[in-house]
Image (spheres, rainbow, N blue to C red):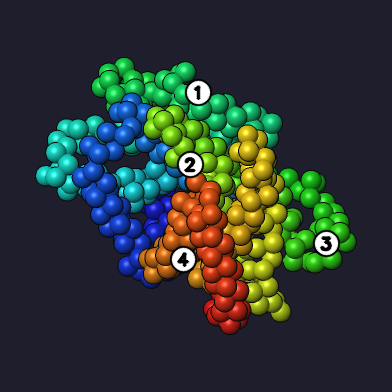
Amino acid sequence: MLKYFLIEEYRRHVAMTKKYSLFVFPLYIIFFTAIGAVFIQDVLAIFPYRKFILMNMLSVFIYGFGVGSFEFLGRAVEGFNLSNTYSILPISSKKIYLYSYYRDAIYYTLLFLAPAFAGLLLSSPLSHLTPLQISIFSLSLLLSMFLGYSASYLAFSIYHRSRVGYIAFVLVVFAYLVLSYLSYVPFVVAEFQITKNPVYLAVSVLAIAGMAGVAYMLTPTELYEKRRFRHGKLAQYHRRFKDILFAKELVDVLRGGIIIKSTLTYFLPMLLLFIFVRVLNRVSSRNVYNSLSLTVMLSIFSTVVYSWLTIMDDYRYIAELPLQPWDLIKTHIKIHVLIVSIISVPIIIWLNMGTPEYLPFAFGLFYLNVFYLLTITAYLAGYRVTSMLFDPGVVMKFSVYSVVPGIILTISSINIGLMGTVIIIITAIMMMVLAFISIKRAKKKWKYFD
């Protein structure tokens, strides 16, 4: 059964884009990992070794937790696939999602961690890292990612037992990550990497096995979708917003638990990033980032929420309706702005508590960049944003369009002055021009679903 899960994953990604594109990402990872490793001594001259290791291990854990949450909580509502065939095949949902856990662990290890290991080995003549050092570091990354996978698997099983329990578990995970980053409690994988103590290795393996085992036991044998909560919601939202597509999208947000999932994949990583920036400011004895530049970063990473909205649609069915792709894109954009506002507005206010005079500018920069990135995404990726993740051409174009103005806004907002303000205004004007050009092109480009 596991073989078929892996085949499905491969076909799913290949179906989204060109066949060769799936193999380009490992090459990207090998290249950038090798380049980064060459400058490892310069990085360690800025960051203490312990903080550097802790930051890496926590980041990989968050990645594993986010990918796992996306797969476990998103795949079940994505349409017909092996993850939800327990309703028609003689196999329980308990076993189905255990195979899903194995699939993700194998697939993303081969797609990301194995190339990272290869990149580190290639860099060894210049980075002067020994094969033993690289192997131990790669093992630590693997353990950290598996901890994230296992935690997301356990969160999924708790989610289907108790929503309150699920929220409580996520809060415990978040608290543990924050306390680990602040060095109040040990993050076991980081301690293994730093001390090479096999006790931490054993604890890490036991934690992975323990969470996966408990998750398997807690996953219900049969999963039943609860519908009472959504009864009458479509008509209610239609009456309130006078837009049936907008109403349908809101129902999908409720049906897919997208607020919670967006919190996991957007809010949690960004909050930890802000904590890291505060530590970085303290280590460097100067403000590397301020509230305005962090707001720009917040808007850049908000794009991840958009992919949750596009995962719910069955485009083969929608293509039969009297709709155009732009109708869906426009609705996705509206809902995206609503969701990121719910999550981001409190963060922006919190970031600017010490400088309330920056608050209007922070909101302006945030929504400027959100609108700009949405229009670029709409033009390049259309109504299926997930497909852009596996198309190198789209990724490269999106990177150019997003990274360049993002860097300019971030750097210019660190030290606000006359020159910085002028650069921000010029950049904002150019972004607005590009945004409206992208909208016009997107309407012409995405007229049909095939």
How far across and how far down the image is residue 137, in percent? Answer: 26, 34
Which residue is drawn at the image coordinates 29% and 24% (left, top)? 194
Instruction: Check the image and report above or below for 115 versus 354.
Output: below
| C-alpha span from label 4 to label 1 | 36 Å
Q: Quadrant of residue 336?
A: bottom right
Upstream in the sequence, badge 3 or badge 4?
Answer: 3
Helix, strand or loop status at disc 1: helix
Determine whether, in the image, residue 430 is placed left or right of residue 404: right
Camera-side residue of 85 and 190: 190
- Residue type, mark 1 in image: Leu
Tell which circle, 3 or 1, labels the residue nearer the N-terminal end: 1
Measured from the top left, where is residue 404 in percent x and y?
44, 61
Mark carried by residue 289: 2
**Sequence-wise, which precedes: disc 2 or disc 1?**
1
Residue 321, by quadrant, is: bottom right
* Badge 3 density bin: few <14, some 14–19, many ≥20, Cα 10 Å: few
Q: Which residue is mark 4?
A: 401
Q: Residues within 10 Å of mark 1 (few under 14, many from 20)?
A: some
Amino acid carrying label 2: it is Tyr
Q: Residue at x 70, y 54 (%)?
A: 338
Label 2 CA crowd tier, 10 Å (few <14, some 14–19, many 20+): some
Quadrant location of the C terminus? bottom right
Instruction: Name the disc covering residue 241, or none.
Output: 3
Among numbered discs 4 and 1, the one appearing first in the sequence: 1
For mark 1, what is the residue? 179
Residue 143 in the image: state x and y as whole percent.
35, 33
